[in-house]
Amino acid sequence: MVMRRGVAAILISAAAFGLMPVFASFAYHAGMSVTTLLMLRFAIASALFLGWLGARGRLGRLTGRQWATLALLGGGMYAAQSLLYFTAVQRISPALAVLLLYLYPALVSVLSAVVERTRMSWTVAGPILVSLAGLTLVVGRLDSGLDVPGLLAAAGAAVAYALYIIVGSRVSASLSPSVTTAYLSMFATGSFALLGLVSGGLDLGFAPAGWVWVTAVALVSTVLAIALFFVGATALGPVRASILSMLEPVVTVLATWLLLGGTLTWQQFAGGAVVLAGALWGILASSARGTSPAAEETVAEASS
């Protein structure tokens, strides 16, 4: 029974994460900017997370070093990853953006080996080579009308997320995932509020429908998705949870096709399958070294 609940929780969580770029696309159609969407998303999420923890007396006391670490992770690295990913979703198909994001498990495998100074074996080089082979199929010819800045933003989001995982796995282990997530969301809110004020990117003059979609991003694809991932990862363990979470890009591809009218070519579908194969290999390789992407998805929202 526990296993079934864990599987169900992870699958629902992955589906909720997978719908996020589609919700974001609808928010953009309502006139919302990337900065505004992300600031509101993290503001709503952090208010709920902090309120829930505070009501249960679980916020705890943080040391100065922990405050600084969370500020770096949430306000810097995770905010940068989110900005790149949501920018990619704005410029290219959400399906394409999420497939490129899933380069991150293979990158984690390689970066872990570099940080730990281990030999470059096939368990390290293999995932990135497979993922890059899939990437060439997904992207195809760069002169085929694809938005190059959008592609670079999606690839940059994968790199930023991999770096975040490597750093986060080493500096946030002393805090519970729920506490870490709450404070990361709070610092990310501050970063996007500051960015919006400096750049003039904060604008609440979007169509009323925008509130529906940003609420969906915050409640369904952030709070609910993270909460269910906690439940599932506790029941199944991080490796199984990470493998099941690979439903996320599948949901994004299907939702993009059904709700946005976008589609991928057969070549891109094949490339996406190869990218996900590299991601799976990267997850297994990283977990063997004790650095599992799934474990870090309990620190902050998976893949986005």
Image (cartoon, rainbow, N blue to C red):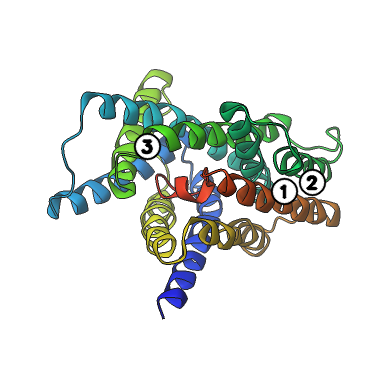
Packing grade of label 2 (10 A; few <14, some 14-19, many >=20) is many
Front-lying residue, 213 or 56: 56
Q: Whole-percent x and y of residue 261?
A: 68, 59
Report the residue at 75% width, 52% height from top. Answer: 272
Q: Is residue 264 visible from the viewing direction of this image?
A: no
Check if mark 1's residue and mark 2's residue have beta carbons within 8 Å. Answer: yes
Q: Which residue is mark 2?
A: 134
Q: Amino acid at mark 3?
A: Met
Picture layout, residue 275 above or below residue 147: below
Distance CA(mark 1)–CA(mark 2): 8 Å
Q: Which residue is mark 1?
A: 278
Q: Amino acid at mark 2?
A: Gly
Check if mark 3's residue and mark 1's residue have beta carbons within 8 Å. Answer: no
Mark 1 residue element: helix
Marked residue nearer the N-terminal end (3 or 1) = 3
Image-quadrant location for residue 125: top right
Marked residue nearer the N-terminal end (3 or 2) = 3
Distance CA(mark 3)–CA(mark 2): 33 Å
Q: Which residue is mark 3?
A: 39
Distance CA(mark 3)–CA(mark 1): 32 Å
Q: Give the left or right position of residue 193, taking residue 19 as reference.
A: left
